[in-house]
Image: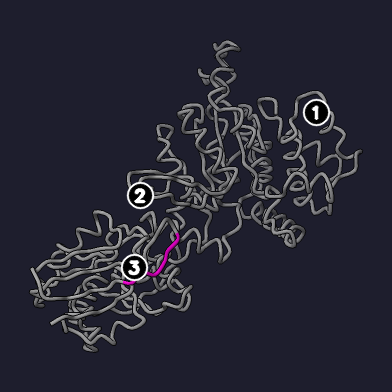
Amino acid sequence: MAGFARALAVGLHGVHGWVVEVEAHLAQGLPGLVITGLPDAAVSQARDRVRAAVLNSGQRWPDQRITVGLGPAWLPKHGTNFDLAVAAAILVASGAAPAVALDGLGFLGELGLDGRIRPVRGVFPAVAAGAKVGLLRYVVPAGNWSEAALVPGADVVGRRTLRGVLALLRGEEPPLDDAASAPQARAFPDSLLAPGGDLADVVGQELGRRAVEVAAAGGHHLALFGPPGAGKTMLAERLPGILPTLDDEAAVEVTAVHSVAGVLPAGGGLVRQPPYQAPHHTATVAALVGGGSGLARPGAVTLAHRGVLFLDETPEFSPRALDALRQPVERGEVVLARTGGAVRYPACVQLVLAANPCPCATAAGDRACTCTPTARRRYLGRISGPLLDRIDVRVLLLPVASAALFAGFDRPDPTSVVAARVRDARAAARERWEEFGWVSNAAVPGPALRAEWRLPRSVTTAAARAVDTGELSARGYDRVLRIAWTISDLSGRMAPDQGDVNEALELRRGLVAA
């Protein structure tokens, strides 16, 4: 006797998802299970996991030919999160539970051979994608329960075993070992995102502190050059602390990215603090921008979405890896094409580069630098001109003087004070650009700054002279204007004055010509 049932699941492609219909058809014939609908290896192997899980949960496996279709059939299916939906459809088709129990119910989870339901990656974006099209009820692994419950309007049930899911479909009480209380979402641990520390810890680097504040206020990319011990890493690590907390839209995006990457802690709430990524200089192209066989996984530039990507000792990175960042930094997303299909990941980051000015990295003092001018140019030349040209703020930090180390007075502004200034400056910029759809000064197109928002010639004299002498490129000129608007916002002015443009030009010049 033939049987049929349909369960619902959600498939992911990057951080985007779609509802998948999991249909099970039981018919007379040679016993076996066939899965159709462009499954990858992990989905195809579900036939063995599901059969063992059903038998070890005390249920009879249908002695019939079972065909499972994953629709739409033309979309590739990846991962193990379809296991639970396949098992539910087969059990209902065999008569183990009423078909009406599957109506409007989505299933996500991997099955162990003993019937346990294991957590899977990407539950948050999967539930969010289903909720957008009206699928609001879900059964998920208990380990993903709090994550799925973050989606507004979603009605989520967490289960630990297939026996508990079957009891739910039958309208029975769950087994004692599967009962659990509703999850309480906690705040996402800040310690997992940024190293922390107070900006007041950085002494004797007024220029560096100013550069970090301006970069934070305008969303500008930043490059810090200087000898070891000048405070480059300390400044970069404190940048996320002065950035504004993420709004609801950004928090959902970042949480989805962390969920797909499998680094979202159990019980954590929406990610509200800007992420921070600092990959080692031996990182490969795949580690930075994403990659892998089949469907590409997100890299550091995506994990830092809406936050900070810090590359310490930048010249030590592979030039190929650095150049791979050029397109994501410019476009705010990374597109990865693999045999499993092309996938898009968000990559709207603030890029921070740090480098010694020469290979010997000798600070000024008792020992003089032994590097020749050619060696210095070759060393910094590992950072390509096109990548460096995308960096707005570029400053050279000098060694810290002993007077700054022992001074007990005139303590620099702490993170809380600087963060308040940054927040006010961002609010001013958002109010000014909101009708145009620009979220920060760094996002304003150059033509707009040179047309309807054009500054008087007397204000931009120094920057125009730098263009005429070849010191500043046309792109660099636009970036100077963006920085000037940020400095104006930090000062509470309606528009930049000549001093703002001149300071912006100095922050742009940095170690090398623009």
Vertical arrangement, residue 212 with respect to residue 1, above or below: above
| Whole-percent x, y for residue 406 in the image | 60, 34
Q: Residues within 10 Å of mark 1 (few under 14, many from 20)?
A: some
Q: Quadrant of residue 53?
A: bottom left
Foreground disc of the pair 2, 1: 2
Q: What residue sits 77% from the left and 42% below the top? A: 481
Residue 252 as seen in the image, left or right of residue 101: right
**Residue stretch in magenta:** 16-21
**How far apart are labels 2 and 1 at the CA level?**
49 Å
Tell which circle, 3 or 1, labels the residue nearer the N-terminal end.
3
Q: Give the amino acid at mark 3.
A: Gly
Secondary structure of the residue carrying tag 1 is: helix
Residue 280 as seen in the image, left or right of residue 384: left
Residue under numbered circle 1: 466
- Which label number is shown at residue 340? 2
Tell which circle, 2 or 1, labels the residue nearer the N-terminal end.
2
Q: Is residue 476 magenta?
A: no
